[in-house]
Amino acid sequence: MKKTMNPQKQIVPIVAKNENDLGVLLGLNSVETATMIYRAELAELVSNAIEKSLLTHAQIAQIAGTARATVTRIAQLNTQSISSDLLVRVLAATGYSVKTKMVKLSSKSVKTLSLNHKLAA
């Protein structure tokens, strides 16, 4: 007897082991991956600073020169359309500053990643 195929496609999750692998999976080059990582780390720092602050979102927004809703979005890590400059301004409005350091990108940080996965039967 023949087995009938399920007409629904099976979804197989692909998991990145680290930020660099995620960049590869997204088709980013090393510069784009470094930017993605930097922005994600900065957004998390700013979100934490907002949470620790004794100021309201409205007060932080007024000091940073932005809308209260924007501060709320940053606090919720919804920062896709928010510039890095604004993230730094909001961080400063909470009483914190950014300390940066330069790190050499690994020569093998983003090359090619071969994914071989099978659909579950």
Image: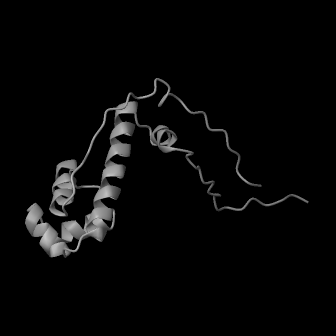
Most foreground residue, 121 or 40: 40
Residue at the spot 15% in from the left edge and 55% down from the top edge: 89
Q: How many marks?
A: 0
Say above or below: 26 vs 114. Answer: below
Give how far across and how far down residue 92 sits, in percent. 17, 57
The answer to which quarter of the image holds residue 30 is top left
Q: Is residue 71 left or right of residue 40?
A: left
Give how far across and how far down residue 1 sits, in percent. 91, 60
Q: Residue furthest top?
A: 107
Residue at the spot 11% in from the left edge and 61% down from the top edge: 64
Residue at the spot 26% in from the left edge and 67% down from the top edge: 50
The answer to whether residue 69 is visible is yes
Say above or below: 79 vs 69. Answer: above
Residue at the spot 73% in from the left edge and 54% down from the top edge: 120
The answer to which quarter of the image holds residue 8 is bottom right
Give how far across and how far down residue 78 sits, in percent. 31, 62
Q: Quadrant of the C terminus?
A: bottom right
Q: Is residue 114 left or right of residue 70?
A: right
Most foreground residue, 66 or 56: 56
Color style of the picture: one colour
Give how far across and how far down residue 68 sits, in percent. 16, 71
Say above or below: 88 vs 105. Answer: below
Q: Is residue 33 left or right of residue 109?
A: left
The answer to whether residue 78 is visible is no
